[in-house]
Image: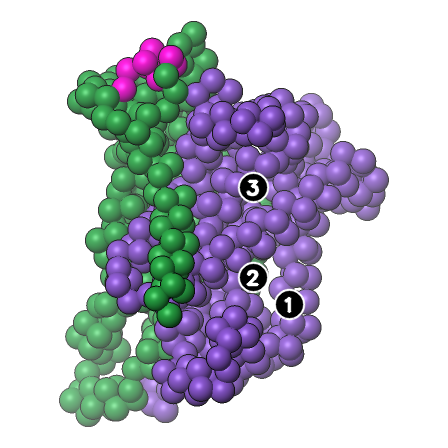
Chain colours: A green, B purple
Amino acid sequence: MYRTKFFDHVILLIGVFIMVAPVVVAFMTSTHEAADIHRNGLSLTWGGHFVETYETVLTRKGGFTGKITGLNMMMNSMILGLGFALGKIILSMLAAYAIVYFRFRLATFFFWIIFTTLLLPLEVRILPSYEVMNTLKLTNTYTGLIVPLLASATGTFYFRQFFKSVPDELLEAARIDGAGPFKFFIDVLVPLSRTMMAAIFIIMFVYGWNQYLWPTLMTTDEGFFTLVRGIKQILLVWVGSNIPDYNEAFALAILAMLPPVLIVVIFQRGFIKGLTESDK
Amino acid sequence: MTSGTELLPAPRGGTGTDGRRFGALRLFGGKAKGSEEAAKRVQFSSPYLPYLFLAPQLAIIFVFFYWPSIQAIQSSFYLEDPFGFGSTFVGMTNYTDVLKSGEYLGIARFTAIFTTLVTFFALSIGLLLAVKADGVIRGNATYKTLLIWVYAIAPPVAGLIGMMFFDQHIGPIVELARWFGWDIKVGLNYFDTAFSMIVVSVWKQIPYNFIFFLSGLQGIPVAVREAAAMDCRSGFRRFWTVILPLLAPTAFFLLIINVTYALFDTFGVIDVMVKDKAANNPITLVYKVYMDGFRGNDLGGSSAQSVILMLIVFVLTIFQFRFIERRVHYN
């Protein structure tokens, strides 16, 4: 028994090493000078140039046109992540509310219309989506960046499941007390959904922040670049030089992963719950 | 799965099967009670309110889902004039051109192999770690945190880190391989590039599978485990005959998610790792759609490929649902 436990720990430690080491190395290496990395390779020790490198990455104007800083890109990522998460929650709560709590003729039809979107990911319709955005003149706008990503039923599905699990008695009681649809939604359903909303918010924020393909298509103006989207362009410029700025590339990668990683680690419990639990 | 990991509630312990795909399929498979199931005993009735609440979501879905989807199908039957003067109806030509192209078939073959390997390794490593983490008591929470946090890293960022680890000058993995006489040249050698892409893609997906397998394992009642422990001394056999069948719904759900991940979400990994030099490098079908549509300006061909991908996604889900589900033990 003791021995099996020992091997369990060995396997887990190997797993942890594989998952954690690359990122630790990336961070440590980012604190070294570029020439140093070029000579000695990646590093597991502190290089002492943390402040300079990160300051450069955040404030120096980079990219092809030389007008975007890391800080700008971080702001754009934040706008995309927050906008997407909030939009998703609002849209899908309203739609789920209509589907679950109202009796109307076209309910089944709309239900299908919405849930069909679960079958086709954005990736299989990128080009026509891009054409549509061009027609609507939405390229290089925050609207174009965020809104098309909202065209899927995931959140609605989620809230529908949750609303169905809310006891019927609550609605009956609320109606006896004379509460209308708006009052019931705001005073009963929204407070009840708080943990659910938080869990979805975390998942959707991470999802929005980490978008790559869509921002790549939608934003050609570097002023709209997100960190994740900008990473390749910036890299091509930096790493193209004689002594590649590996440190800055790594610093950028660390910055791009920092907010979503922090959120997932801090709200781990809620995040896992939101991800894995459906019937509550 | 649109960039795959924006996910829905998944099965826990072996009770439900509500994932994005599942949820949808249950409806399409006619198994669910559809919206009737959603109906409350008491409901509001209002001539306009439900439409008002649905309007924003429907508007966005129509403009950004149905319109482009229909456009994709439509333009797959047309040949766009290279100078932008309208287009000609060409029937199935775009499809036959695509399916006859040796390059396309090669990419399709690579995509199949890539998807199989990524799915297999990501699932099995995730399962192994989950089983071990479920078994230990000491340090359980720490292991969990350390094993899941990579979930939050975006695929292209993972690709960037991977690129550095496979770098010719500074990459530790390249150095390690050199010891064994293997000279890894990512970006130059087809096989090496494919290898590094698979490693990075698997690495990125392990946490996701770990989370679901672990919560599936923790959903298995203690009584069942104890009974199994009494009946069967061999831990390995117990795992195969008792635990794994109970995990089947979770594994089934994850299978679909992982296939979708490998097909679509690895775009970021690939794009960063091949760095615009797709010519001799391994790429997947989604990357090809992107290349042809945005670099090659081949609207018809790219649309035809999009439609083929749509069909693959459709067939895949229906196949999974119809055939595999019967062999999975739901309780």
Q: Secondary structure at mark 2?
A: helix
In magenta segment, residue A254: no
Asked whether the beta carbons under mark 2 and mark 3 sit within 8 Å of each other, the answer is: no
Q: What span is colored magenta in the figure?
A: A32-39
Q: Residue at x 47, y 60 (%)?
A: B128
Percent of width and height locating residue B286: 61, 42
**Disc 3 secondary structure class:** helix
Q: Quadrant of residue A237?
A: top left
- Kindly report the distance in space between the C-alpha atoms of the residues bearing marks 2 and 3: 17 Å
Q: Name the foreground residue: A260 vs A105.
A: A260
Identify the subunit bearing mark 3. B
Q: Residues within 10 Å of mark 3 (few under 14, many from 20)?
A: many
Q: Position of residue B15 (x, y in %)?
A: 45, 80
Tell me which label, 1 or 3, sits earlier in the chain: 3
The reply, left or right, for residue A253 in relation to residue B248 is left
Q: Could you tell me residue B197's position as x and y percent? A: 55, 37
Contact between labelled residues 1 and 2, with CB atoms less than 8 Å apart: yes
Residue annotated with mark 3: B198
What residue sits right under mark 2 in the picture?
B255
